[in-house]
């Protein structure tokens, strides 16, 4: 990416987020249980769906949300790493109806209290506020143990904790029934987990490729057994060249509930370190670690993973029996 | 559905996320207005130059030279950002040094990444 492009994008992002509605909307998206909400799911029965859709699309144009094609034609939107790092703290610390005073983004205790409150509302029917608070604190500790930059921790914690809580309450789907067989409304997406050692290369490549190919039909999670603090720069550059770098996420550790919530677990070079939970399907892809390799080798590794991911998607979407 | 099973897509019935987002509009204005002040290519460049300067502060003359802009233009941008609490002014003799407000340093740093 050239300097001009980078500066142009930066200006576009700042201009886009100089809007209180969008800041609040980003805070809601960061703590969304699905991780990839639609305008309809955010609006609920009483909200202004068209206005929310317009905000989401403006944020997508600025590279702050990544749109995913939805099964019913309505796109889902994932927060991008740029959104998390540049505006996550501002969004979470911005005053809300429940918390009329802004908090200092550097005051992590109060930032975590905000996140806990937001997530407790989302899970009011299923989880106690104490459980939510425990998961938020634990998620923060897990990320803080390896973080090199502390000030992004609250925003990263919001996304990580929201993902873990969603996994905790998800109906466990081990029989391959994905169409809401109990008649409970919207189809439950297929849950796929990619695990590698550092969550900085192989699992991120697989996740970005699968998200781009499957859209909102599949919920993709990633984790590392020994996560790094950021993506490998060479991998990020190669994914940017292919237009899917915005579908990655900040590296995170492997936790028990995301394994349990996944129908398919794919390990990439760390099969031994990933606990096996009965009833889940496992794949182990022996793929070289791309970290620090020359560009042409990274290209080859991404090609290899892309081919495997497309094969996996065909298999997942094939009707059972 | 058995009562013991958690609901598949838990959504609060009392307050939808969008409602939370709309209600807070007036209060979230303060953060947004900060972003509005810096959403200008020249102002972002000025912040970037000040942030990367060895002293963490710059004079109008330094910025004018580096940006290739007229001095009144640069002074105007500095004045707006100082009034909005983005920049601090430190007079030293006949010169004024502009630095980034310490409380805003991290937020500005994230924007300039």
Image (cartoon, helix red, strand yellow):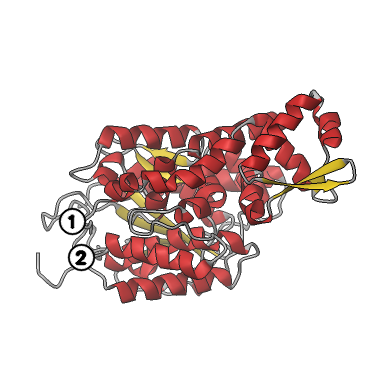
Q: Is residue A105 left or right of residue A187?
A: right
Report, in whole angstroms, how far the alpha carbon at label 1 lies from the one at label 2.
9 Å
Q: Are marks 1 and 2 in contact (CB under 8 Å)?
A: yes
Q: Residue at horizontal 61%, vertical 51%?
A: B107
State whether residue A136 appears in this view.
yes
Badge 2: few (under 14), some or many (20 or more) residues near its Cα, within 10 Å? Answer: some
Camera-nearest residue between A262 and A313: A262
**What label does residue A125 carry, if any?**
2
In x, y percent, where is residue B85?
63, 46
Q: In this view, does A251 lie above or below A135?
A: above
State whether residue A314 appears in this view.
no
In x, y percent, where is residue A206?
49, 50
Q: Residue at horizontal 55%, vertical 55%?
A: A202
In x, y percent, where is residue A266?
44, 60
- Chain bearing tag 1 is B
Q: Is residue B69 left or right of residue A255?
A: right
- Chain bearing tag 2 is A
- Outermost residue, front side: B93
In x, y percent, where is residue A207?
47, 51
Q: Residue at horizontal 32%, vertical 76%?
A: A130
Secondary structure beneath dot 2 equals loop
- Pick the quarter of the image with the N terminus of chain A: top right
Q: Name the residue under label 1.
A: B13
Q: Residue at horizontal 45%, vertical 38%?
A: A19
Q: Are marks 1 and 2 on the same chain?
A: no
Secondary structure beneath dot 1 equals loop
Q: Is residue A173 left or right of residue B34?
A: left
Camera-nearest residue between A55 and B2: A55
Badge 1: few (under 14), some or many (20 or more) residues near its Cα, within 10 Å? Answer: few
Q: Is residue A160 above or below residue A128?
A: above
């Amino acid at each position: 990416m050239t300097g001009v492009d980078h500066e142009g994008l930066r200006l576009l992002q700042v201009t886009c987020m100089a809007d209180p509605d969008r800041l609040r909307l980003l805070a809601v998206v960061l703590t969304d249980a699905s991780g990839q909400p639609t305008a309809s799911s955010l609006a609920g029965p009483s909200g202004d769906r068209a206005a929310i859709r317009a905000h989401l699309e403006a944020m997508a144009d600025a590279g702050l949300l990544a749109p995913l094609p939805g099964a019913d034609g309505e796109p889902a939107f994932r927060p991008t790493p740029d959104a998390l790092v540049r505006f996550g703290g501002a969004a979470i610390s911005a005053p809300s109806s429940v918390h009329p005073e802004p908090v200092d983004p550097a005051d992590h205790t109060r930032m975590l209290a905000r996140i806990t409150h937001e997530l407790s509302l989302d899970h009011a029917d299923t989880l106690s506020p104490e459980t939510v608070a425990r998961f938020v604190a634990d998620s923060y500790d897990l990320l803080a143990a390896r973080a090199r930059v502390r000030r992004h921790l609250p925003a990263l914690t919001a996304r990580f904790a929201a993902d873990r809580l969603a996994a905790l309450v998800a109906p466990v789907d081990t029989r391959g029934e994905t169409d809401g067989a109990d008649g409970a409304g919207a189809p439950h997406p297929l849950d796929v987990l990619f695990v590698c050692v550092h969550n900085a290369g192989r699992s991120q490549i697989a996740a970005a490729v699968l998200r781009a190919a499957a859209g909102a039909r599949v919920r993709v999670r990633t984790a590392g057994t020994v996560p790094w603090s950021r993506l490998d720069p060479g991998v990020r550059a190669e994914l940017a060249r292919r237009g899917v770098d915005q579908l990655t996420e900040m590296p995170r550790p492997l936790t028990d509930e995301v394994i349990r919530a996944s129908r398919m677990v794919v390990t990439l070079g760390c099969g031994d370190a990933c606990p096996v939970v009965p009833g889940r399907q496992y794949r182990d892809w022996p793929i070289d670690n791309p970290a620090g390799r020359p560009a042409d080798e990274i290209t080859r590794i991404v090609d290899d993973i892309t081919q495997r991911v497309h094969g996996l998607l065909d298999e997942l979407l094939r009707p059972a029996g | 559905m058995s009562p013991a099973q958690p609901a598949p897509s838990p959504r609060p019935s009392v307050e939808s996320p969008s409602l939370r987002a709309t209600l807070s509009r007036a209060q979230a204005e303060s953060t947004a207005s900060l972003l509005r002040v810096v959403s200008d290519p020249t102002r972002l460049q000025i912040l970037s130059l000040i942030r990367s300067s060895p002293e963490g502060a710059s004079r109008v003359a330094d910025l004018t030279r580096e940006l290739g802009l007229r001095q009144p233009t640069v002074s105007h941008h500095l004045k707006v950002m100082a009034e909005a609490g983005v920049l601090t002014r430190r007079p030293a003799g006949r010169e004024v040094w502009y630095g980034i407000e310490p409380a805003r340093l991290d937020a500005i740093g994230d924007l300039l990444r």
